[in-house]
Amino acid sequence: MNSKTKYVIGNWKMEPRTAVEARALFLSIKKQSSRIKNTSIIICPPAIFLGDLQMAHSGNKISIGAQNVFWENPSSGRGAFTGEISANQLIDSSVEYVIVGHSERRALGETNEIVAEKLHTIVEAKLTPILCIGERLRDEEGEYLSFIKEQIETALRDVPHNKIKNIIIAYEPVWAIGRGDDAMGPKDMHEVSLYIHKILVSMFGKKIASGVDVVYGGSVERSNAEELIKGGEISGFLVGHASLYADHFIDIVKIVDNS
């Protein structure tokens, strides 16, 4: 692992069902994370629960992230955009990180250009973007590599060089989601990690590229986390389903923390 920073990011998606369950899950993770020393834990709940987690967050080293943001300029933070959430509103809810470009958002119609606009908004608001990239299918000819390259280049093309080091890239191959231990092996992850950094070097130079953290987000479980973190040349994980179970999630955090 190149970076000294380690991350385990919990993406709760559209769970839990109630604010009571969300608060209980957060407090359980908080309690079990007291001995974690070297890993940043980030919890990204549904936006409707941000206020509840903000109250439970006090005095705790766990960071809160958001699953989405609107591209409106954070300096205004207002406008006729029904149902959207601004960067300023996220900041007011103690949010520090924002997931952008998640495969499930892209499947709903978000283009590379929309992802780029949102990422710029996040950077401008001095929040940390978690930029999700990844192919839907993997072909033997390697065309999926061009797909990944286009996602990265479009999202980061106009980002100031001095802001690049503050971006986390989450590689989430869509074809691997739901496959558990049969998803991606450490060798394949290592190759993709090297490829991502190669793209970053071509865009920003070796020094800047070396400061970007890459995490993996395709069916991360406590059963496959250890081999991935040891051999994948990554800085941690973006965890979906397993983040809804405090014991499972903390086991993954411990594996990363001890790597």
Image (cartoon, grey):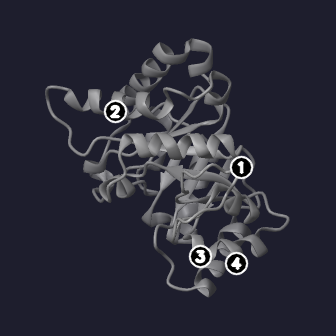
User: Element type at marker 4?
Assistant: helix
Check contact, mark 3 vs mark 1: CB within 8 A.
no
- Residue located farthest toward the front when viewing the structure as drawn: 80
Question: Label 4: which residue?
Answer: 52
User: Element type at marker 3?
Assistant: helix
* Residue 154 in the figure: left or right of residue 84: left
* Distance Cα–Cα, label 3 vs label 1: 23 Å
Name the amino acid type tagged 2: Ile
Q: Nearer the viewer, residue 49 or 224?
A: 49
How many numbered circles does the render carry? Answer: 4
Residue 61 screen position, x and y as percent: 78, 57
- In the picture, the disc for residue 93 is none
Residue 126 screen position, x and y as percent: 71, 43
Q: Earlier in the sequence, mark 2 or mark 1?
A: 1
Q: Where on the picture, by quarter, is residue 138?
A: top left
* Distance Cα–Cα, label 3 vs label 4: 8 Å
